[in-house]
Amino acid sequence: MKLTLPWLAAHLETTAPLATIAETLTRIGLEVEGIENPGDRLKGFVVAHVLEAKPHPNADRLRVCMVDVGTGSPVQVVCGAPNARADMKSVFAAAGTFIPGKNITLGQGVIRGVESNGMLCSAAELELSNDHDGIIDLPADASVGMAYASYARLDSPVIDINLTPNRPDAAGIRGIARDLAAAGLGTLKPLDAAPVPGHFPCPVSATLDVPAHLCPKFALRLVRGVRNGASPPWLRDRLKSIGLRPINALVDITNFMTFDQARPLHVFDADKVKGGLVIREAREGESIVALDGRTYGLEPGMVVIAASQGIESIAGIMGGQASGCDETTTNVLIESALWDASDIARSGRKLGITSDARYRFERGVDPAFCEPGAEIATRMVLELCGGEASELAVHVPPGFAPAPPRIIAFPFAETARLTGVDVSAQEASTILAALGFGVAPGIGPGQAQITIPSWRPDIEGKADLVEEVIRIAGIARVQATPLPRLDAGVARPVLTLLQKRRQQAQRALASLGLVEAVTWSFISQDHAKAFGGGAPALALANPIAADLSDMRPSLLPGLIAAAARNADKGLGDVALFEVGQVFLGSGEKDQRLNATAVRKGDAGPQGAGRHWAQAAQKVNFDDAKRDGLALLAALGLPAQNLQLVRGAPKWFHPGRSATLQMGPRLVLGYLGELHPQVLEAFGVDGPLVAFELTLDQLPAPKARATRARPRLEMPDLMPLKRDFAFTVDRAQAAGDVVKAAQGADRTLISKVTLFDVYDGPGTAEGKKSVAIEVMLQPRDKTLTEAEIESISRNLVAEVTRKTGAVLRG
Amino acid sequence: MSDTLYENLARQTLAAINAASSESELEAVRVAALGKKGTVSALLATLGKMSPDERRSAGAAINGLKDDVSNAFESRRFALKQAALAARLTSETIDISLPARDAPFNAGRVHPITQVMDELTEIFADMGFTVAEGPDIESDDYNFTKLNFPPGHPAREMHDTFFLQPDAAGERKLLRTHTSPVQVRTMLGQKPPIRVICPGRTYRCDSDQTHTPMFHQVEGLVIDKSANMGHLKWILEEFCKAFFEVPSVNMRFRPSFFPFTEPSMEVDIQCRRDGHDIRFGEGSDWLEILGCGMVHANVLRNCGLDPDEVQGFAWGMGIDRIAMLKYGMADLRPFFEADVRWLNHYGFRPLDFPTLAGGLSG
């Protein structure tokens, strides 16, 4: 919403300077987004008198002009405009002036051998219109040397208010003036909305053929015998000052009323409307060429104003071109109506029309100002265009009674309850009255009956009145007051187990050298499908881009795509992780928190890239396993409870992937090398390894009564080590050998370390050699050779029984 | 035997000891002198055959000779060992300029959003706030209707909502446009007093330098029997001081409009802009950082609370935005592009965990 000081002064008697007005507007909730003076862009342009215009010696189309710019000595300017002629008044810019329409700063020039010390300008060069056919032709009485911005009255600062949707009343300058007056910045001037006497009944009928709430009131008046033409300068200037284009007096009056009073009106050329008007819903297949020249297809649910030859106007949104007013209009129909806010919003949205009328109707126009708006507009028409007015025909749906004024019982203490500021009953009453509220004594002490003005649809309850009081009294009066702790003493822990695990996971993964990314929650449908997602229930109806269309089923696609983007930028191989939400369905219990990491190419645990001490190694399964197990350990999951089961979902390499689980059913996640076909689809060079864990799946630690650790046993006896080498089938998991060895004597075998796996030359076909180191921890006495021998025999027997391994000789 | 003989033997043996250039040569000399058949050992053996008088005079000389030779041998052995060690150490000299591998915990980073969320948690946990969360896919009811956005209200349109496809029952879910539905869930799920912050991902169909279709918000909610705008102002001031790590801030509250609060306010913070640096607690610019207000009576009613019995306030701000203000990122979009140059530069080392005791950013 834009306004200028002269326009504001038409409603507000004030001596406040611009800065005070702007500061006050922001303070009372009409936030000033900017103050711009269009004159600032026209610095250096002055009114000039062309003294002579001679043909250019070297160019037929150019003229050499001597120009009086008010400095006393005429300036020579070369000009190419066809209308440049001696004795005209125009606009001059000296060298060094910034020309907004050309986005250049004018230089000194020699044009075809003749010196040119400036420029005579077109309206397009000043960005005042699109007219670049000739230089500006000013009236003969224009004062030479005067700044053009002042001459053209383009030097009023424009205040731009970022209007909140709850204040339709402030979509008119009068409403803003009322707020400023209440804030103590002046007095609101009286408004003359007295009825204009009608000389004859309105001859055009209007039939309301819609449910009553869609058009509670429709006022219509004919003014005959008008002369339509350009508006007087004051009106043109006013519209131009806030960026509106003057068209003709009748149209300008409606635009003026929209911004002056937040009362959108429509004018029809009565001679172009055949028959009576019918307010009805549009029918399937109907369309209209609107005032913006575009054709709009209409549909049922959209309210229109129709006459016998078709639809004349889209109610409350935009009029039709066919019955629009132009210079030939001699009989004009003025419409002032009430429409339903949500219906206008819905129709406007469907049609894609954003008009000043729609803006106001969908926020709520003052229902009590329907007739006064028509009267004010009629008076303006009579003043500017002459003519004779009919009576104002006011059509209301049968049986439709206007809503009575709303009254709220307001205890004045409510302001202190919500704001902590003690505003006296007297001050609050004064503020409310200044804003147009009716204040009457209420039931009981400290209470008032507050009548809500018709132009404030946003006021519903006590809290709204508190806001009115405090915004005018001053929010700065609110004093910061410490909020007491709920329980005294040291702050208690607040995080849930999952929230804490999320924090720990992020720090743990970064400690492994992985870099945290935050990627989009939505991915392309192809990517979603490749990772088990892409269900219709998780597809966006209105994605912002085709590749951000489906809620992600996994963090992998986002991270793999991110790894690919980094590689495409030449940033090498990356190790990335994300801890974030994935979506199994659209239900509120279908969201999971995953922790996922990827390592691409040579970005192994040692760090990416080549290093002098060690050739760069490609990432492999073990790196993913190490990351995944390290995370689980950091989150307090004992490794001995975990199982690694061969195989993982289809996006993993079938032979180099595993499922992490606890027990046969509780799946925590997956890890391994990504399937080469998946990588190919992403355009990624492999290998790429990853793990993905679902943090919600991790069991909670056992609750314990105290924080004390279990007692630690540290035997005094020296542990001893024995090595065993087995030959075993190549397909046999070496981990089973270790497990079998561990199980051979749970008391004395304290640790089994796998230190060699070999299946090269020297091993039998289909076999491999697996070597382990076994640590024996004597408990209460030193072990004898015989005892050690016995344990070893048991161990070998157990390993052989479980895995078919044979001890190598 | 004469003293001269001893002297000659001593001279020869000591010369041989000094001439030895390695521990093995030295050992050969030792064996030749002090070994079972060594020259000095042979002399010692002669003592047994001497008369007591001879023994008295020769004994001292021979034992003296033996001691001299032994001492010379030990000191020569020590010198040779030192020399050998020095030579070995010299030969072991390496190029100290060869680059070391970065420690993994120095190479890794956490995202600035994570860091800022952890900072927020630290600050508000100290003030007794718990952290509440809710699903990203929300119902229209929780995201809008319960929050006093009437159907068809223009304020809904300002939210540029992402919708999912309608389900079989015709219900159209949406991606939450703010974290306010978590407030609704909290009020429906727990009795006052309530003190929560609700951080999380939010979505709007909008994209430019300062808007991305996905972003992060944190909201706060306090409900009890007396919480008013004075308390709200205090909390926000304390938060801003703690978060921006400045001794004082100057805040400006402006009346504004949100459907779910009444009265509603926007809050500006005073700052000085210095290139792309922003300093808080000084300067003359105002920067909008959050919206807040007293929870609307309709919202309380929609959540089963009586607005004449309980009252409270809520506020909300962009996590990405306050991260940008504090840590100086100029553009929002790279937050979600995962460019490792950006993550390495603006990310945080994993051990830089923010604590109130140690200072949020160390």
Image: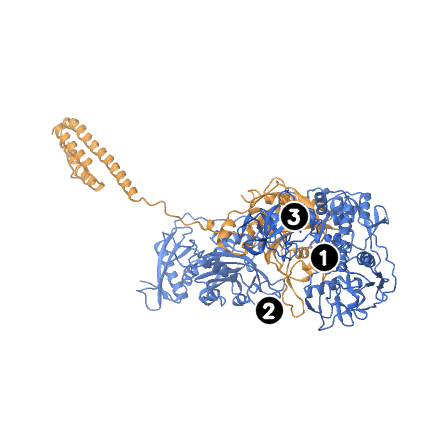
Residue B237 rendering spot, x and y as whole percentages: 65, 43
Disc 1: which residue: A246
Disc 3: which residue: A48
Residue A11 rendering spot, x and y as whole percentages: 78, 49
Q: Disc 3 residue type?
A: Ala
Q: Tell me the CA gap for discs 2 and 1.
A: 51 Å
Rendered image: mark on residue A536? 2
Q: Tell me the CA gap for discs 3 and 2.
A: 69 Å
> Which chain's colour is blue?
A
Q: How many marks?
A: 3
| Tag 3 secondary structure | strand
Q: Disc 1 residue type?
A: Pro
Answer whether residue B255 is visible to the viewer in this image.
yes
In this picture, residue A631 sits left or right of residue A47: left
Residue B32 rendering spot, x and y as whole percentages: 16, 39
Let me know if marks 2 and 1 both belong to one chain. Answer: yes
> Which chain's colour is orange?
B
Colouring method of the image: by chain
